[in-house]
Amino acid sequence: MSEKKKLRIGLAAYGTGWDLSGWRLPEATNRGLVDPSVIVDVARTAERGKLDYVFAGSALGSEPDRLNRIFRWDNFVYAGYAAAVTTKLGFLMSVNSSFEHPYAVARQLATLDRFNGGRTALNVVFGIDREGDPALNYGKNPVPTEQSKYARAREFTEVLNRLLYESWDEDFLLDDKAAGVLVKPGSWHRIHHQGEHFEVRGPLNVPRPVQQRIPNVHVGLSEESLQYGADLAQIRFSPYFGLERGKAEYRSLKGRVAAAGRDPEKFKIIPGATFYVAGTSREARAKFREVVSLQATEEIPEVFSKALGVDLSRVSAGERVLDVVDVDTIDADALDAFFSGMARRSPSVVRDARALVRQVLSTQLGEEATFEDLYQYLLRSRDDQQPALVGDANHIADWLEENLEEGVLDGIQVFPPYHRGPADAFVDLVVPELQRRGIFRTEYEAGTFQGLLDTDNG
Ligand SMILES: Cc1cc2nc3c(=O)[nH]c(=O)nc-3n(C[C@H](O)[C@H](O)[C@H](O)COP(=O)(O)O)c2cc1C
């Protein structure tokens, strides 16, 4: 019997959780905003679960008025610290190619990859969104426009790669004390890069990384992003498009990689998701409702009630959706328009909104769900087109297994709604179930990020 294909799993490390209101739960800790030991523990948890990596995002903008983005640690300092308490776990490092310089980033990446023994990956990003725009803090520098950001990203990546892999030969360290020769003559090379955005002579003043190539992870929906990823990345963070459209998007992304002359099997597609998981689905749903109830309540917008075809002035937000609405008769166009309006940064990925609502009510929130629950659920899924999954370990494992087997995704990046419980629950409840089903590793197969990626996994 051939081995089953296995998931790749990452875990996002933030000072507090991903949810808008989960931080207010009595059991939530937000000390990670001020106490590094708390988020270093996220790395320990990830390694306990044999996860592939922790995701250490980058933030150059400042957003003091966004609760889950008040403070963002410098990700390289974080990863250096957390690497010391782990041995196999990977570190996925975001760097902003629009504002950072490839020479400085090459130093950071090469240093980290040495210090953690080859457990580093790179994620080239451009800033989260308008509100926290890095340009507001880096304004005197020439700031690339939407059109030029990928030209700069490509040049950034080229300079980075040349600095990392062409500066120093493998055998540069002669250490010949008798002859008084420390470094082998001719073992280093200038790169003499003169480009539109960067001028770099080199060589890098840090030895080459442990890995032959530091894996590149990319995210974005534009045509330029899709092509950058197909040409240069090993992993794509993708929105979750749902089962049917997800299969088509997956095939199309892999097709692009093949067209770029690369092996599509070695290119992994990983959406993000938030998990509310507990011993039973009833407990998980209760926790989701508790989190929702902590939201500093905005009124449920009229546009939402209109989309459902309900006059909310006559129905309470606490009423069960299925008592009032027949999902089959919802005006699909109005619902689609609502979803498009919610997608702030990029176009909505929702195609069949009616099917989504039906699915959320039947499998995630259950038939008990109220208008408030449904609205808050959809609100939580909109930002990065990341679904919220609510249920017991079996339910979560079913969802992951179905999406893996149907060819929608190769892995998942977990964004815990709050600290600490959800990351532990994922590792202690979901991971063993995935292992039991043969779709997740029981031991690390390698000690480097690329080594884990290269492992033939069915
Ligand atoms: C899962 C995920 C993680 C991201 N992480 C970061 C990050 O750490 N730092 C950042 O500045 N932007 C981050 N972004 C934002 C992307 O850089 C941004 O969406 C990108 O500009 C989209 O490219 P596009 O304009 O080609 O679609 C992230 C986006 C997603 C979906």
Image (tube, rainbow, N blue to C red):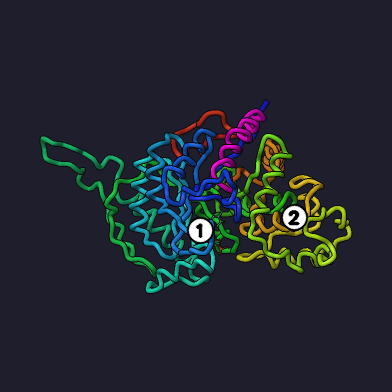
Instruction: Indicate whether 387 appears above or below 311.
Output: above
Question: Which secondary structure is most common in the magenta stretch?
Answer: helix
Tell me the residue at 63%/52% (across/down).
Answer: 255
Quarter occupied by residue 391: top right
Please tell me the numbered disc located at residue 69. 1
Quarter of the figure that contains the N terminus = top right
Side (left or right) of 11 relative to 187? right
Q: Is residue 215 visible?
A: no
Instruction: Indicate whether 72 appears above or below 286.
Output: below
The tag earlier along the polypeptide, 1 or 2, is 1
The residue labelled by disc 2 is 374
Which amino acid is tagged 1? Arg
Q: Position of residue 3 (x, y in %)?
A: 64, 29
Q: Which residues are magenta?
A: 418-439
Looking at the image, the residue that sits furthest to the top is 1
Please tell me the numbered disc located at residue 152. none
Quarter occupied by residue 155: bottom left
Q: Position of residue 55 (x, y in %)?
A: 50, 48
Instruction: Indicate whether 38 appears above or below 131.
Output: above
Q: Are marks 1 and 2 in contact (CB under 8 Å)?
A: no
Q: Is residue 16 visible?
A: yes
Label 2 element class: helix
Distance between the Cα atoms at labels 1 and 2?
A: 25 Å
